[in-house]
Image (cartoon, rainbow, N blue to C red):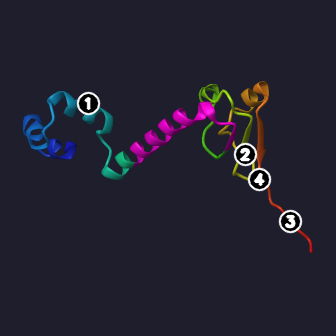
């Protein structure tokens, strides 16, 4: 839709074709302009994932993840007690100082060896 307007269709023609208002068109253009379809799809998936975190974090006790857990997300996760990070090292994707201050344990899964 945005590409069509950039290719020469007027905003009015694009709006009529897709049944949207000019205000909606410009809002979409501001949000997605310059992105191709795969970029826009990825953006929406990340937005959906963030919405899922906001919805579920307040009741989460244990989190198994490698997602960003900055102070803003930790503040939402009022019941969180343990984060199992699925990386084999401690990446800078978690606010470790805030976890320590709040008593949230951050554990990582390391290589496990067994002898027979």
* Disc 1 residue crowd, few under 14, some 14–19, many 20+, Cα 10 Å: few
Crowding around mark 2 (Cα neighbors within 10 Å: few <14, some 14 to 19, many 20+) is some
Residue pointed to by mark 1: 27
Cβ–Cβ under 8 Å for marks 1 and 4: no
* Residue at x 12%, y 37% (from the top left corner): 15
Residue beneath disc 3: 113
Residue at the spot of label 4: 109
Q: Which residue is at a point 68% across and 30% down the rendered structure image?
A: 79
Residue 61 in the image, given as x and y percentages of width and height? 69, 36
Q: Are marks 3 and 1 in contact (CB under 8 Å)?
A: no
C-alpha gap between disc 1 and disc 4: 44 Å
Residue 81 is a magenta residue:
no
Residue 40 position in % (x across, y down):
35, 45
First-in-chain label (3 vs 1)? 1
Is the N terminus in the top left, top right, bottom left or bottom right quadrant? Answer: top left
Using residue 53 as the reference point, say whether residue 12 is left or right of it: left
| Disc 3 to disc 2, C-alpha distance | 19 Å
Q: Mark 2 to mark 4: distance in Å?
A: 7 Å
């Amino acid at each position: 839709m945005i590409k069509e307007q950039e290719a020469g269709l007027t905003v009015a023609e694009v709006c009529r074709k897709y049944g949207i208002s000019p205000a909606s068109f410009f809002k979409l253009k501001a949000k997605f302009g310059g992105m191709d379809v795969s970029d826009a799809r990825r953006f929406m998936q990340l937005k959906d994932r963030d919405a899922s975190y906001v919805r579920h974090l307040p009741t989460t006790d244990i989190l198994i993840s490698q997602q960003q857990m900055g102070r803003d997300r930790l503040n939402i996760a009022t019941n969180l007690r343990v984060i199992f990070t699925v990386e084999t090292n401690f990446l800078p994707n978690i606010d470790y100082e805030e976890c320590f201050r709040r008593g949230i344990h951050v554990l990582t899964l390391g290589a496990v060896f067994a002898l027979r």
